[in-house]
Image: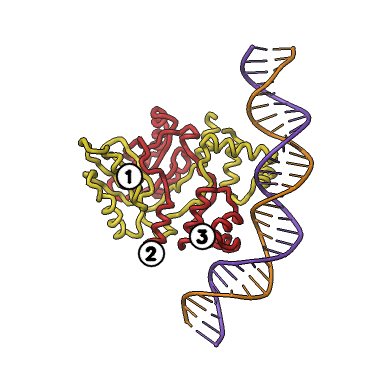
Chain colours: A yellow, B red, C purple, D orange
Amino acid sequence: MDQLDVTLIDLFAEEPRVGVLEASRRLGIARGTVQARLDRLAAAGVVTGWGPDLEPAAMGYPVTAFLTLEIRQEASPTSGHDRVADHLARIPEVIEACTITGAGDLWCRVVARSNPDLQRVIDKVLAEPAIVRSATVIALATQVPRRLRPLAHAAVTDQG
Amino acid sequence: MDQLDVTLIDLFAEEPRVGVLEASRRLGIARGTVQARLDRLAAAGVVTGWGPDLEPAAMGYPVTAFLTLEIRQEASPTSGHDRVADHLARIPEVIEACTITGAGDLWCRVVARSNPDLQRVIDKVLAEPAIVRSATVIALATQVPRRLRPLAHAAVTDQG
DNA sequence: GATCAAGTGAACAATATGTCCACCACGGAG
DNA sequence: CTCCGTGGTGGACATATTGTTCACTTGATC
């Protein structure tokens, strides 16, 4: 992961249509180098995919909310966390979920078609009896859109 | 946005190397149709890009945390939110940020090289004087990895 | 019945890909 | 000091893909 890798990532992020050959021309390096770098980034797990980036709002889900769930900790046939994770994974409106420190046990991001529709989504989430409490926060305006490239720059600038 | 669009998105998400031609063969449709669909999805804003997906952990930032910030609401030269958003945008470790309902004013996701390093990142965030209070929650284990394709399926199945 | 958006199948030149190769430069290990 | 191994270069080749345009067929809408 060096400066060239980051430049490469930037180039492909900004102009996905450029091929390997065009990229090599733009950066003034050999085509084989570009291919090798991309392979290496993928092998290192830095680049995990090249899939299309989807926008929930454009798909009809403009409302985003964050749920903090509290899970029943008692002994149960299966672990409470596993059960809940399984449950959440079956709900398409749940975009991501993870366990967290602090008051809540589980954090998850959900989307909905509208504010009323958010109630439907929350109800789906709360259908799992292992969830004993939940708190909802609605996302209003995006201040910093999801972005990882600045981090890539920092990763090579600060250290390597 | 219909079933074919979703199938197309799935195909490209799973095998990014397949070209337009190969995709048309796999799905048994004309090449022109694939191209037109992809153009349409991009024009509709459903597909916002084809950039490489980056993994912060693989770049040396395995720690993820969520910060809830409270912003000073008093009158100021520029709006408090704008100032803070600007400040956050300059910090590469800030992956995303948005305003929220509820107790806090601003929510943001940050990453760090380690737990001690998280302190450094938080200090950077809190350097902005318009932030009057903050709460930190550390993400432990990912239960549902970020995913939008199930949502795409739901979008066409439930309605259209 | 007319019209429009969308899909098909085909064609073309231009370009990119996958995959070899030999060769050079550098840094670390011995 | 010399011997690799890794990474980069530049070139070659056949094959496959792209961008683009065309004429024709649908199916739904008005």
Q: Residue at x 43, y 59 (%)?
A: A59
In the foreground, A9 or B29? B29
Residue at position x 53%, y 34% from top? A44
Q: Is residue A29 visible?
A: no
Q: Is residue B28 left or right of residue B118?
A: right
Q: Which residue is mark 3?
A: B41
Quarter that holds the C terminus of chain B: bottom left
Quadrant location of residue A33?
A: top right
The label nearer to you, 3 versus 2, is 2
Q: Which one is closest to the eye, mark 3 or mark 1?
A: 1
Place of residue A139 in the rendered image (x, y in percent of width and height, measured from the top left): 35, 51
Q: Amino acid at mark 2?
A: Gln
Percent from the top left, x then y, of residue A100?
Answer: 32, 37
Q: Secondary structure at mark 2?
A: loop
Disc 3 residue type? Leu
Question: Which chain is mark 3 on?
Answer: B
Between A38 and B74, the one nearer to me in the picture: A38
Q: Residues within 10 Å of mark 3 (few under 14, many from 20)?
A: some
Q: Is residue B28 above or below residue B13?
A: below
Mark 1 residue type: Asp
- Residue A87 appears in the picture as rendered: yes
Residue named by callout 1:
A86
Disc 1 secondary structure class: helix
